[in-house]
Amino acid sequence: MRRYTCSGCSLLCDDIMIRSDGLFIDEVIGACLKGKERFDQITAKNRITSPMIRKGDKLSKISWDEAIEEVVKIIRNSSNPLLYGFSNSSCGAQSKAIELARSIDGFIDSNASICQGKVLGIANEFGFNLTTLTEIINKTDLIILWGANPAETIPRLLNKTLFSRGKFRMTGREIKTLVIIDPVKSASFNVMGVRDIALQIEPGKDIELIQALKEECCQADSIPSEGVAGIDQEDLKRILLHIMGTENGVIFLGQGILKSDKENRLIREILEFIQIINSKQEKGRMSLIMMGGHYNMAGFDHVSLSLTGQVGGLQFKEQNVINGNKSIVTKINSDDFDCSIIVGTDPISHLPSTLSSKLSKRPIILIDNQMTGTAELADLILPTAITGIECEGLAFRLDQVPIHLEKILDPPSNLPSDEDLLNQIVMKLNEKGT
Ligand code: SF4
């Protein structure tokens, strides 16, 4: 048995024991159900192992040469291509995708831009403290889950951070306080103990809550006696006492906040709140971790920053990034694209129906390893190896730490990695006379 990293979610657990003969995985120890599913994907029924093209209502198998020719044909006929996804691809593939977008003057965006990328996009206005899992395990005494439900989305997060004993937290769970702020009583509420604080906020009132906490930080006794956003005055005072007294606190910002905050008002308020806490705290400090779901959601922003100096949607014109101020949502909504290249994601199922129906009206090239709603409507499907199982790659964990993912076994039908396939497409497009 050997130890490997699981790429089932952005926690990238590096303590999974695997027995494999190089052809199959015989045993997986230490992974949660979600991680187990990731390893089961190798032989799943919806696995795609051959390129396919749509003919009428049906998808038919084609050879790899024909598939690459078709990709080139669609791209050559396009003047405004859209590239999207990449949170389930390695940093090498993300870098190749940006190279492709640059060479064809396309627009490229990752799933992060409608999730945790929003925070980085405005971080230059505020700056904020990041922290690492190791620091949380060793030092944290206050964990706040805001719009976050790790028990279901990142299943081993609380095992590692809340229930662990660290170098300076030898008493472990007993000294750590958990605060959950959420309108829904999610599965994560089930781990709460007597010293923890559950704040079931009224839906859509998070801004009111932050503003009240900010005000109370600056001017004591400003919280109205009837409470704020459905939370009573006493609970608000209690949580503020914990926040201002923490030696090392962390806010996990979940998708409940990241996805719903369309104009980033809430994220701005939270970053400002953290700034106030840290300026008033004498010894302690508060940090932030964004809870992106896909295993390399954080990676795209790092790659994009290092290659172009920008995060979020990148619009290329004459092979330079222009400041288009656009996102995947505005591009699709305004029909500002004429074909799409989707990698490792399922926007047809996940985007609102108005957007997914617009997306489906233009040719879709899908690079993925499983049948999804997007695959059902794609014009061309190119399957790839599963990163972290059938090919190696680099990914950034949710705390922005880079982790190398190893290959465990060979992919079926000798499938290429996302990076290799994108490289083949770039090279084919650069060939003279094609
Ligand atoms: S928490 Fe995430 S990375 Fe860890 S085992 Fe589960 S799916 Fe894999």
Image (tube, rainbow, N blue to C red):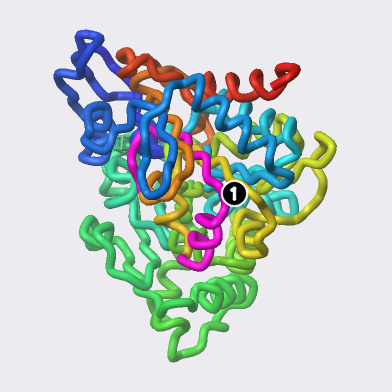
Q: For mark 1, what is the residue? A: 117
Q: Position of residue 208 (x, y in %)?
A: 54, 78
Residue 129, visible in the rendered structure: no
Asked whether mark 1 and ligand 1 are closer than 8 Å, the reply comes as no
Q: Nearer the viewer, residue 271 or 29?
A: 29
User: Is 359 contained in the magenta span?
Assistant: yes
For the C terminus, which image quadrant?
top right
Kindly identify the amino acid type of the residue bearing the numbered disc 1. Answer: Gly
Q: Is residue 194 left or right of residue 371?
A: left
- Vertical side of 308 occupied by 311: above or below: below
The residue range painted magenta reads 353-372
Residue at 31 percent across and 18 percent down: it is: 412
- Vertical side of 351 occupied by 16: above or below: above
Q: Position of residue 416 (x, y in %)?
A: 45, 19
Write down the quadrant of residue 177 in the picture. Answer: bottom left
Which structural element holds mark 1? helix
In the current view of this chain or complex, which residue is farthest to the left? 26
Residue 425, visible in the rendered structure: yes
Q: Nearer the viewer, residue 364 or 405?
A: 364
Write down the quadrant of residue 413 in the picture. Answer: top left
Q: Nearer the viewer, residue 220 or 157?
A: 157
What is the count of numbered marks? 1
User: Is 282 contained in the magenta span?
Assistant: no
Q: Residues within 10 Å of mark 1 (few under 14, many from 20)?
A: many
Residue at 50 percent across and 73 percent down: it is: 206
Q: Is residue 344 left or right of residue 208?
A: left
Residue at 47 percent across and 38 percent down: it is: 380
In the current view of this chain or complex, which residue is farthest to the front? 56
Q: Is residue 97 left or right of residue 394?
A: right
Q: Nearer the viewer, residue 224 or 63?
A: 63
Which quarter of the frame holds ligand 1? top left
- Vertical side of 257 occupied by 122: above or below: above
